[in-house]
Amino acid sequence: MAAQLIDGKAIAEQIRQELKAEVDVLKQKYGKAPGLAVVLVGERKDSQTYVRNKKKACDEVGIVSFGTDLPETASEEEVLQVVAAYNADPAVHGILVQLPLPRGIDEQRVLDAISIEKDVDGFHPLNIGRLAMRGRDPLFVPCTPKGCLELLKRSGVQLSGKKAAVVGRSNIVGMPAALLLQREDATVTVIHSRTPDAQRICAEADIIIAACGKAEMVGGDWIKPGAAVIDVGINAVDDPNAKRGYRLVGDVNFAEAAEKAAKITPVPGGVGPMTIAMLLRNCVDGAARSFEAEVSA
Ligand SMILES: Nc1nc2c(c(=O)[nH]1)N[C@@H](CN(C=O)c1ccc(C(=O)N[C@@H](CCC(=O)O)C(=O)O)cc1)CN2
């Protein structure tokens, strides 16, 4: 392997330590701690694990976590009532509704109901809209793409003036990642299922963010020698030799790409841990804004 590994687990740990110090300062200055409310609807095992990990990470840095678990059968109105209660609660500075929601609940309606001042996932259309505008700043940026940019910056990858390819155009990763790269003065191409010549475009890019949800789709011949490669994919592939009966692979063929890239993230241990670190970052930023607004009111 020629590439240098971008260790998301270690960088996320470093960020949590930085945040713990910031939270201590906030507590001393304002006499209160940031609060994060996590809403989980249904019994999906993966969502339960993510929510548990989010709460554990909050404890570690000194953020107070609040939680509401609703059954799979909860109605949209019940979910909206929980969101409304957290919107009105001054001890809560961030609200997160774990996705995906059970079928029958209008995800967009629920996300739209979160106050933009508490939208620590950055999924509210006003926050996304501001991200897309020059001269306007969102209050929060979605955690996974924010984590991708943080990994690039902390690994010393220059963005300004570089060619970037984002593979995938989802609302929660691909599109915001493209907007963030553009804000850093990269020239960005978004590649999707109907893009002709996807491989050629990707192979011309200095920076690749792969977020298409297809196991190992980005092969070695998609990578420009010396490129920085950020792999957002988390795909389970059956493997009878693995402890859990499956192993996780990204959207990038790691072994092939690592021979060509200068820097690359692994899966697991790359972007995944950064998603939670960026959630904490957003929550601390939201709380700091709220505390400051209170004292200057
Ligand atoms: N409201 C939200 N819902 C969801 C989000 C989100 O950002 N906000 N993202 C994903 C799930 N997610 C956090 O919620 C998440 C996914 C993966 C990881 C992670 O650390 N993955 C590990 C591997 C884990 C394993 O071994 O199974 C890794 O990549 O190293 C963290 C958070 C969907 N829902």
Image (cartoon, rainbow, N blue to C red):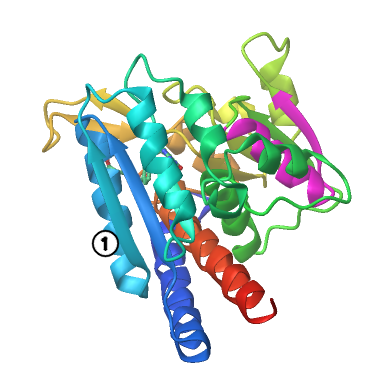
- Respond yes or no on whether mark 1 lies under 8 Å from ligand 1: no
- Asked whether 25 or 81 is in front, the reply is 81
Query: What residue did someone put label 1 on?
Result: 56
Residue at (37%, 73%) from the top-left corner?
Answer: 61
> For the residue carrying disc 1, how many other residues have a C-alpha within 10 Å: few (<14), some (14-19), or many (20+)?
few
Residue at (72%, 26%) from the top-left corner?
Answer: 190
Residue at (63%, 81%) from the top-left corner?
Answer: 295
Vertical order, 65 against 131 (above or below) = below
Residue 155 falls in image quadrant: bottom right
Residue 220 falls in image quadrant: top right
Three-letter amino acid code of the residue under disc 1: Lys
Instruction: For residue 98, say whether it is visible.
Output: no
Picture coordinates of residue 191, whole percent (x, y)? 68, 22
In the image, which residues are magenta? 172-190
Q: Residue furthest bottom?
A: 28
Q: Quadrant of ligand 1?
A: top left
Picture coordinates of residue 79, whole percent (x, y)? 36, 33
